[in-house]
Image (cartoon, grey):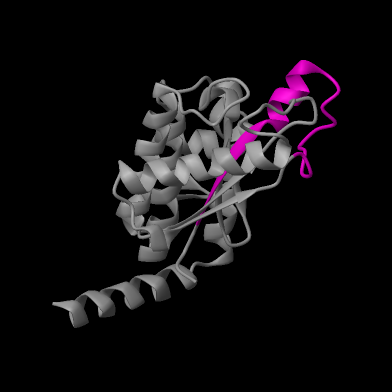
Amino acid sequence: DFVTAMMALFLLMWIINMASDETKAVLSEFFTPEYWSGTSGGAQGRKSGNIVGNTGQARDADNLIPSDRTYLAIAQKLKETLSAKHIPPEARGVTSEKDGILLNVNADALFQPDSADLLPQGELVLDDVADLLEEYNLFLVVRGHADYQEKGTARYPGKWELSTARATACVRYLVDYAKVKPSLLRAVGYGDTRPLVPGSTPDEAAKNRRVEFFFHRPE
């Protein structure tokens, strides 16, 4: 019933908040290139079926506490999403932040050029995002970013309008087609005010032209 469901929700939130510093360190190492290239202890542990922290000491997955399993399950789910063939490796990435996990996708992999019209592969990415939200009861902030070289159009006069329209298009798809509850979502547009790199070359401009999906626990 409703009361039982709420008790289970609060128990899950408490377990997640009890995650140890070692767990957070493991999660941080999970997203480093060295982990997946086989040059760190993490890669060695992954190949042997164990989970390895920064200390290099492997722990059997069956002996993890529930909070550890939750963090690592979310990380693994994101890793699987990024490994799918929806978008190329150079157009995506995952980083851990203080209060959640950030999925970064190049806008060119999601939208038509100079527009907020979703591509078919962009819809596939959003379907994966919706599955993750449902499975782990997460909230999501979608952040749209433009690069300084993008020019306005009649439909999107400037970078603010374009970046906001892209974030809103993602949220609209999640609500209308993936049936995600609107109360779980927020859309924000930053124009070109938060570049990742200087953007002086086409490759750098592409990195700045992005959509970020910030997954976080209920506030």
Looking at the image, which residue is at 40% across and 63% down? Answer: 183
Q: Position of residue 129 (x, y in %)?
A: 40, 42
Q: Which of the 4 quarters of the picture holds residue 65?
A: bottom left
Say whether residue 78 is left or right of residue 205. left
Q: Is residue 174 left or right of residue 40?
A: left
* Residue 13, image x, y percentages: 40, 72
Q: Nearer the viewer, residue 83 or 25?
A: 83
In the figure, residue 152 lies in which quadrant? Answer: top right
* Residue positioned most to the bottom: 3
Magenta span includes 210: yes
Residue extending furthest top? 202
Q: In this image, 208 relative to 79: left or right?
A: right
| 117 versus 135 height, above or below | above
Q: Quadrant of the N terminus?
A: bottom left
Q: Nearer the viewer, residue 14 or 138?
A: 138
Give the camera-side residue of 54 and 3.
3
- Nearer to the camera, 127 or 92: 127
In the image, the segment drawn in magenta is 192-215
Question: Was residue 198 drawn as part of the magenta stretch in this picture?
Answer: yes
Residue 29, horizontal then vertical, whole percent:
59, 45
In the displayed structure, would residue 147 be above or below residue 213? Answer: above
In the image, residue 16 sits, relative to residue 155, either above or below, namely: below
